[in-house]
Structures are given as structure tokens and as C-alpha cells.
Amino acid sequence: MNTRIPHHPSVSIIGRRRFLKGAVATGALAVLPSGITRAASRDKVRLACVGIGNRGADVIRELHKTGLAEVVALCDTDIGSEPTRAILNMFPKAARFQDFRVMFDKMGRGFDAVSIATPDFSHFPVAMLAMSEGKHIYVEKPMAHSFLQIEKMMEAEKKYRVACQMGNQGHSDPNYFQFKTWVDAGIIRNVTAITAFMNSPRRWHGMKPAGLLPAEPVPDSLDWETWLATAQPHDYNKGYTLGEWRSWYDFGNGALGDWGAHIFDTAHEFLQLGLPVEVEPTLEGHNAHIFPQASTLAFRFPRRGTQPPVELTWYDGVKNLPPLPANYGRGVVDPNIPPPSSGSIDTKAHPPGKVIYGEGLVFKGGSHGSTLKILGGERAKDVLADLPKVPASPSNHFVNFLRSCKGEETCRSNFAVAGPLCQAMALGVIAQRVNTTIRFDPATKRITNHKAADQLLRGQPPRPEWLGFYKL
């Protein structure tokens, strides 16, 4: 099953769409009152997994652990390599594929949902094909690589009426419910500034490439052309794989794309931040190919109804430490931060976090599901004396997704929620690339002051054979 075969997306997509329409007409698929389409009358969600090593393996284990999923297919461009073996051994009866397009062609009728844990730049084609097939999807953060890709995924979620969950698992943990409760109760209100930071060493720190990496022999086990997906042609180099892709503008989204969704996601949702009108970068070690050695990004969000404008300032880089309140104390270490795909990351010595400045209160928080602490402010004494009860989570992020596939819950980090968050981060990445302030018009969704930056909203033009995924 690992043999690469010729694939013509435009032909197979049309054929599968015809099948999907027929399945709905005959009742093989059920449409829930919420509008979400699901497979009918199954105890477990049949799951196909694309990207099964490293972080992908963690996601698969968590979905399996719920008892709500049956893993029926495994797909990886380097299937059989060391990072994939644990999952292959865990599910020996699952069908195996090296190309997700072949997986859909050969057994598209045999699964209901897809987990996607490939590099950032290749989320998009897998997700778009899956949604067009009526498959529910769990996709790692950030949703996609470019502003346009995220926009199209948001449109596809609405069009195909499937359950979609982005993998920022804190959206199902205590911080999510606390933040919502405190906003509803008026404890968090009239926020004007947020400081968010991630100061641990990153893969690209110390790198100063003058160009792309030199060609190396492609390992026999790797389907490099499929690994590249929609990206422009690149010579193979191991320095692009196994998590190293995060360093490169062509493949990753840097520290912001990796960690922003774990640090300021709840603030973005419950303060209804939407899209910024300006992003101002201050960078150290700007490079045309990899992310800066340190970045300070000031995101300026406009007034939303009665809520005042907000400036969210992002800090990354080991020595690019943010200004913090005098009584901030030690950082918040979330015990549920997963390990990196390779190497190590010290989130205990340099814990990521945030400070939120609201009306009469200052809040301290960490990443993922860590709850907020009130540091002080003129309202602190009264508020602390009468805090509202915060409800417990009815389901973790993986259970929430699978129950949503079955029509029992709604995905908390669906694309209508996660999309604008990821688009805001995508604008930050563009500001890093052009190394100048960009001004954005949320109404037209265009960058108005920098032609090259505006073109970057579309991302890399796909190779011709991948263009069809942008038309689904």
C-alpha cells in the first residue's frame, strides 16, 4: 500500500463529490439539527490519521484513549521510519498509506474523520480534501500556512457542514471556562493591553543562512514530492524535516504560529479581538529565509462595539524579555505542554505566559489550560471576595471533537473561532518577513501600505498539480 501511484486530483475529487451527494440522498450520512453532517448509527468514529510520527503520534494516542475512535487508516510520507513505528505497532490492522490522496481514493468510504498533524504548510490540502468529502477533521495549530488558506478552510467548514477542531487543547481546559465565566461576570472587562511571551530557545536561534539548504539524497523511505504538498519545489535536506521546518518561512510559522494559539487564544475569542488593523515589528536578526532571532510584534486591534481598542504585544527570543508587573513572580508552568518533535524546549526555566490589563484589574496567565490569577488593581479586593463559580469542562479537546463528530457537542475551537486567531498570527508572520509596520483593512482583507506584504496574504503559489485544492 505504500507504493506511490499517479494521482489526478481534479478527476478523483469530482468522483468523490458525486459519491458524497449520493450518500446524503440515500441516508448513508445524517445531517444533524445543527447542520453538521455525520456518519449515522456508529458507536465509534472511524478515524484516518495523516502525519503519525512525533506530535502526530501524541494526537492519535489521545484520540484513541477516549474510547470513541477506531483508527482504520494511517498515512505518513515517511511511513515506516523510526518516528512512525510506535503508531504502526499500536494499530497493526490499520491500512497504511504514504500519500493522503491515495488513501482517499482507495478507502474514502471507510472512515468518518481525519486527524492532521503534518507540518504547518501541508495542513491545507489534507483538510480541504477531507472537508469536501464530508469528513470531520482535527487539525493541529495553526490551521494553515497562509491567510488565504485559513480563509478557504473557514469557508469550507461552512459549506461542507463538518465538525472541525483546531488542536489548541487549552480551549477545552480550565482556562477556557474561567475566561468565559469572568468575561460574562464582568470581571474581565475593558481590556486595553495584553503582553504575551515565549522566550525559550528555538530551533533557528543561532542560524544565519544566506539561502536555502543544499541538496541531499532523498531517503528511500520518504516521498519527498508529497511531503512538499502545495509548496514550491525545494531540494531535499534533512534540515527541513522532523520539526526543523518550523524555522523556515516556506514551511512554518515560527514561535508565534507555534505558541500564540496556546497563550492568547481565549483572550482573542472572548474579547472578540478579530483582526488587527496594524502590526508593528521590532526584530533582531532579520533573515530572508528563517524567522528572526527575536521578535516584538505590536498587534493593534480596533474598537469592537463598546469595547476599547487593544494592543497585544508579542515577545519571543531568549533575551527579548517582556516588561512585567513588579509582583508578577514566577511564571506559570502548565504540566500538560507536550514535548517537541525533536530536541528539547525548556518551558520551566522560561515558561510562556501573558499579562492582561483590564479595567481596574491586572491578570497573570500561562499557556494551554492554565488559569488566570488576579495580580492586583483597584477592583481586586472586591472581586476576589466574590468570585463566580467556574464550571468544569464536560470533555477534553479530543473527546469534544469526537462527540462533535457524533452530533453530541460542538467543537470549541472550530474554524469560525480558530480562523480569525490564526489569520491574526499570519499577519504577524508577514510583518516579520517584510520587517516593517503593516496596515490591514479588515473589511477588504487587504494590506494597504505594502504591496509585497499584501501579496504574502496568498502565500506561496501552489504547484499546478495542487491548484485543485484551492478550488474545493
Image: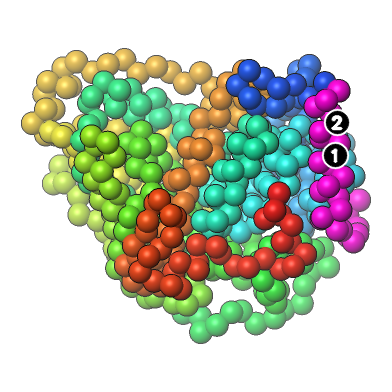
Residue with the most extreme bottom position? 210
Q: Secondary structure at mark 2?
A: helix
Please report the bounds of the magenta region as a residue range.
1-26
Which residue is identified by label 1? 18
Q: Residue at x 28, y 48 (%)?
A: 302
Secondary structure mostly seen in magenta is helix
Q: Secondary structure at mark 1?
A: helix
* Percent position of residue 116, x then y: 66, 45
Q: Residue at x 85, y 39 (%)?
A: 18
* Percent position of residue 285, x then y: 37, 75
Instruction: Please state which amino acid type lies under the numbered disc 1.
Output: Arg
Q: Determine crowd level at label 1: few under 14, some 14-19, many 20+ residues with C-alpha closer than 10 A.
A: few
Mark 2 and mark 1 in contact? Answer it, CB < 8 Å: yes
Residue with the most extreme left position? 378
Instruction: Please state which amino acid type lies under the numbered disc 2.
Output: Gly
Residue 22's mark? 2
